[in-house]
Image (spheres, rainbow, N blue to C red):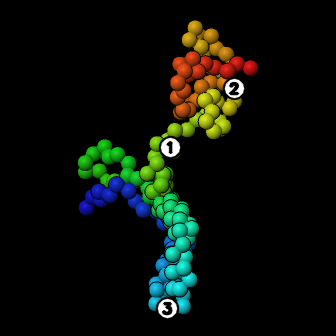
Amino acid sequence: MISTMLFKPVILWTDVLIFLIVFATLVYFFRVKRYEHLRAPWRQVAKRRLGMSALLILLCYVVVGLSDSVHIRQALPRTNASEKVFYSTQVKSLLDVLISPLGTKTEKTYSAPFAIHLYSKSLVQLPDGREVRAYPRLKYGEPTSSTQMNDCLIFF
């Protein structure tokens, strides 16, 4: 039988610990639900706008954290329909898959946030054929409104 799964789940020990914490939190809230003396302080938190906004922010962090704790290996493209499914050696989280364009766009070196030029000098070929050492334009930097800025190189 040929498996048609698009991914293979991977369980890391850190993920197990995180999901144990989530499970313990759920057990705690089911316990709080049964006893009035444990429910009263949470009712006070729920009445306040500050408490509810803090809960909303905390839930956003939890959703991002849990999506980064679900790991998978994606299926590789098959050459034959009857061939066995092989999976990538690269383990990705669900968050990596959801924001996949960000992980695939890498530059040569680190650059400052919002920079448009590479952090280190590199050998660049100019349109006239000359080669110079310059700070080349980043491939994935944000586009600017000026076409002069887009094509310029910084020479020092």
Q: Residues within 10 Å of mark 1 (few under 14, many from 20)?
A: few
- Mark 3: few, some, or many residues within 10 Å (few <14, many ≥20)? few
Q: Is residue 134 left or right of residue 12?
A: right
Above or below for 69 versus 155: below
Provide residue 96's location: percent of width, then percent of height. Answer: 48, 52
Q: Nearer the viewer, mark 1 or mark 3?
A: 3
Q: Nearer the viewer, residue 31 or 77?
A: 31
Q: From mark 1 to mark 3, how far is it between C-alphas?
A: 46 Å
Task: Return the x and y of residue 39 as percentages of the image width and height.
Answer: 51, 85
Quote the CA–CA distance across marks 1 and 2.
Answer: 24 Å
- To which residue does mark 1 refer? 102
Residue 55: tell me if it is visible. Answer: no
Query: Which residue is at 53% across, 19% downward?
Result: 147
Dot 2, how many residues are within 10 Å of its Cα: few (below 14), some (14-19), or many (20+)?
some
Point out which mark residue 121 bears: 2
Above/below status of 67 relative to 45:
above
Where is residue 87? Give x, y as percent.
Answer: 40, 53
Q: Amino acid at mark 3?
A: Tyr
Q: Under tag 1, what secondary structure?
A: helix
Residue at the disc numbered 3: 35
Residue reaching furthest right? Answer: 156
Kind of residue at disc 1: Leu
